Amino acid sequence: MKKVLIVGSGLGGLTTALRLHRRGYKVEMLEKFHQPGGRLNQLKKDGFTWDMGPTFFSMTYEFKEFFEDAQLKEMPFEFRELDRLYSVNFRGSDKRYVIYKDLDRLAKEFEEVEPNFREKMNRFLDSAARFFHDVEFVVLKRNYDSIWQYLLTLTRVPVKYSPRMIRTVWQEMERHFESREVKEIFSLVAFFLGATPFDTPAIYTILSYTELVHDGYHNVHGGMYKIVEGLTKEMDKAGIPIHYNTEIVDYKNTDSGKLNTLVDQHGKEWNADLFVVNADAALFRHKIFKRKKFNQEKMDKLQWTMAPFTMYIGLDTKLDDVPLHNYFLGTNFKEYSGNVFKNSVKLDQPYYYVNVVSKSDPEAAPEGCESLFILCPVPDLRFKPDWSDRDEVANNILTDLGQRIGIDVEKHIVSKTVLTPVDWEKAFNLYRGSGLGLGHNLSQIGGFRPKNFDEEFGNVFYVGASTVPGTGLPMAVISSKLVVERIDKKYGSLHK
Ligand SMILES: Cc1cc2nc3c(=O)[nH]c(=O)nc-3n(C[C@H](O)[C@H](O)[C@H](O)COP(=O)(O)OP(=O)(O)OC[C@H]3O[C@@H](n4cnc5c(N)ncnc54)[C@H](O)[C@@H]3O)c2cc1C
């Protein structure tokens, strides 16, 4: 029986483990953190519970595909589709725009600022839908052996879509809508990719189609961490061990283009026939394999996604008037989003996202209390290495939030945990604290993204956000499908 060692227990690692187990591999996992899930993690403190990172996602059918492929009887967690996707408030205004999946209700929200919203939105979504369905299987869910193979594949995409490669998300918005509010709100999808609408290619407006029409947005009954709990339960049943607090720091014993051994921080050696790396695909090549193509200078020149500044707040009161998912934006969208990631704007009037966790899962907070998760996208550690102003930034956000929801939030805080990009980097080995891994500009996607197979060791593979196809929960699941396809192709299913 061939043994596979998986480094990292993020969603990509966990789903790969179960897919390979059902193919007859003996699987073992290593994880540097003290519990599984990677960025899809959980924090419990003072009687409150928070999901540490992801709060909602789309393309749930990728999980269903995974369950079928891994031959698991039923999904050990329950998705909940959101009709009210999120709400958006601009600083200085009392108006709260609610983004409904139902287009009639959505049109009502914008009738005052965007004449003929419904027709314009239909046109925008139709064009995004056509593009999505023309590229989903042809380009997105595919392995590439080389850049040439990728470029050849792109020639199969109808030429009419070429301008989307050149335009940005913001330019695509400007072609369809007039009002500032609509353009800013529907270009937030670029932030979901950890970038801004001004540097994200217009191809990613497909995310508006997936959120508003195709599969919508979902969360998980009982919290997002139920996904990890469900998967690890399946791993227990399958006898797949995970060794926590175990970080790979080196390698040794290679022969004829094969890796035999990885070494952890205590010097312990881990041998296997195959290795799947769920740690960041670029960083592992840089830090562990010390590859020239991923040297320090080149790593810093890559486009990395925003770094997270996150807060996990417990309040001793209810926020009856605040919905589940909320974006709080300012009035200088272009200036702010164009500069924030380069640390060229101050964080005294930040843009941020608030998830009132306990609205959707009451057990996340004690009776009469509320759990809040706050995410503020900030510069990564290349641009802002010093976070000694952490408390100041946190207070700016909390004061601003209090003013906008009409409650003195700070007075009601009974639990508070703040994580800066330094903490995120340390917890999960995220390069320079970048929250979503490598960015998605044209030179970092498809055949240009770090490959899911190693350049030197024929028995080393990669899965997760910084390899193909990209970041986000459904992409991590697709990534596991793609890497297992590669392993299948090379070694075959051992059950056959
Ligand atoms: C704040 C935040 C909010 C987000 N919100 C959303 C959202 O709402 N919706 C969505 O779809 N996505 C969201 N994402 C993105 C999503 O979390 C990620 O794309 C996805 O979880 C990445 O999974 P992964 O498999 O690449 O691995 P990761 O989650 O990165 O897991 C990799 C694992 O490898 C471990 N590791 C690293 N190096 C080593 C080593 N040397 N030795 C041993 N172990 C190692 C790490 O500790 C980690 O556990 C968010 C991310 C963040 C940070």
Image (cartoon, grey):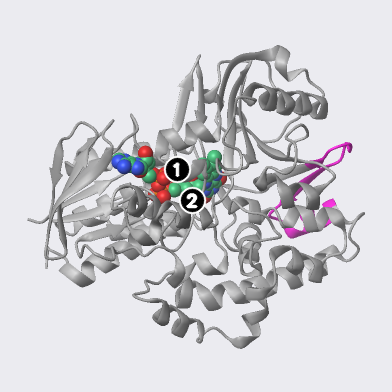
SS at mark 2? loop
Give the answer, above or below, for where 228 lies relative to 147: above
What is the x, y in percent for residue 484? 28, 62
- Residue found at x 46% / y 57%: 298
Q: Earlier in the sequence, mark 1 or mark 2?
A: 1
Q: Specify start and end residues of the magenta stretch as a single range.
A: 89-109
Secondary element under disc 1, as helix, strand or loop, is: loop
Cβ of mark 1 under 8 Å from ligand 1: the answer is yes
Which part of the image, by quadrant, shows the N terminus? bottom left
The picture quadrant for ligand 1 comes to top left
Residues packed near mark 2 inside 10 Å, few (<14), some (14 to 19) or many (20 plus): many
Mark 2 CB lies closer than 8 A to ligand 1: yes
Residue 343 located within the stretch drawn in magenta: no
Q: How many marks?
A: 2
**Badges 1 and 2: C-beta atoms under 8 Å apart?**
yes
Residue 430 bears which disc, if any?
Answer: 1
Residue type at mark 1: give it. Leu
Question: Which residue is the site of mark 2?
Answer: 437
- Residue at point 16%, 41% (across, down): 239
**Residue 39 visible in the current orientation:** yes
Label 1 to label 2: alpha-carbon separation: 7 Å
Residue 492 appears in view: no
Name the disc covering residue 189, or none.
none
Question: Residue 123: x and y, percent?
Answer: 75, 73
Based on the picture, tell me whether residue 91 belongs to the magenta stretch.
yes
